[in-house]
Image (spheres, rainbow, N blue to C red):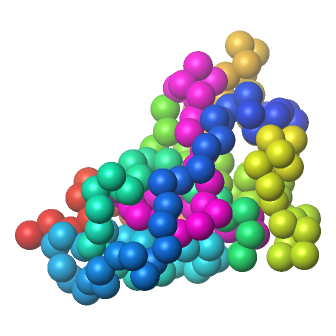
Amino acid sequence: MELTKVPLTDFFTIYPAKQNDRITFTEADINDVDAISFLSRSSKMNGINGFVLGNEELLNDGKIISIALDGSTGATFYQYHPFFSGQNIWLLKENSEKIEVIDPKIALYLVTSIRKAVAAYTYNLSLTKKRLEKINLLLPIKEDGKLNTDYIYSEMNQIKHIELLDEILDERYQV
């Protein structure tokens, strides 16, 4: 299948995460069942920079793609669980008319495509919302203009140990 260059904004709505400085949260241990991951602009550990307790009004929904606009510019991840966020983290919510299903396999494929599309941006030439809105992605597109998830599944299922994505717990911590 041939990949098609498409505008990111045709497939995603871009909006800022609910965010606050980490010092406003109470530090928590990863083993605390009430702890929530805190997302920073790191390019490691899915962007998670620790675990905190905090104001539920600042909690971002999970099952969404996050992207750092500076710091580790372009650090893009799929956040399966709800999270708190530091500054300059933006979220990409899928357009349900173009992406019929988003699960960890589809998300990992999309994250990889987004990372490649923003690779030219760095700390010195950081992403902005305006620049992000102009990004084009290479994606498998069906004739009706929708994301070809069958093609993505066939590609992703060739990755060694990809089945581990199916084992992500619905809750971050289960007792």
Q: Give the quadrant of residue 151.
A: top right
Which residue is at the front of the view, 54 or 108?
Answer: 54
Which residue is at the front of the view, 33 or 23?
Answer: 23
Which residue is at the front of the view, 7 or 108?
Answer: 7
Vertical order, 58 against 33 (above or below) = above
In the figure, is residue 38 to the left or right of 158?
Answer: left
The mark total stands at: 0
Q: Give the quadrant of residue 143.
A: top right
Q: Name the residue located 45 percent from the left edge and 77 percent from the top edge.
A: 22
- Residue that extends furthest to the left in the rendered view of this protein: 175
In the figure, is residue 14 to the left or right of 61?
Answer: right
Figure quadrant of the N terminus: top right
x, y (%) of residue 16? 59, 50
Find out whether residue 62 is within the magenta segment. Answer: no
Vertical order, 58 against 53 (above or below) = above
**Is any atom of residue 40 visible in this view?**
yes
Find out whether residue 87 is within the magenta segment. Answer: yes
Which residue is at the front of the view, 73 or 109?
Answer: 73
In the figure, is residue 146 to the left or right of 73?
Answer: left
x, y (%) of residue 148? 65, 30
Q: Name the residue located 81 percent from the left edge and 60 percent from the top edge.
A: 127
Q: Name the residue located 83 percent from the left edge and 76 percent from the top edge.
A: 123
x, y (%) of residue 160? 53, 66
Q: Name the residue located 54 percent from the left edge and 25 percent from the top edge.
A: 96
- Residue that extends furthest to the top in the rendered view of this protein: 144
Vertical order, 164 against 147 (above or below) = below
x, y (%) of residue 74? 74, 64
**Is any atom of residue 157 visible in this view?**
no
In the figure, is residue 38 to the left or right of 105?
Answer: left
Figure quadrant of the C terminus: bottom left
Q: What stretch is highlighted in magenta?
A: 73-100
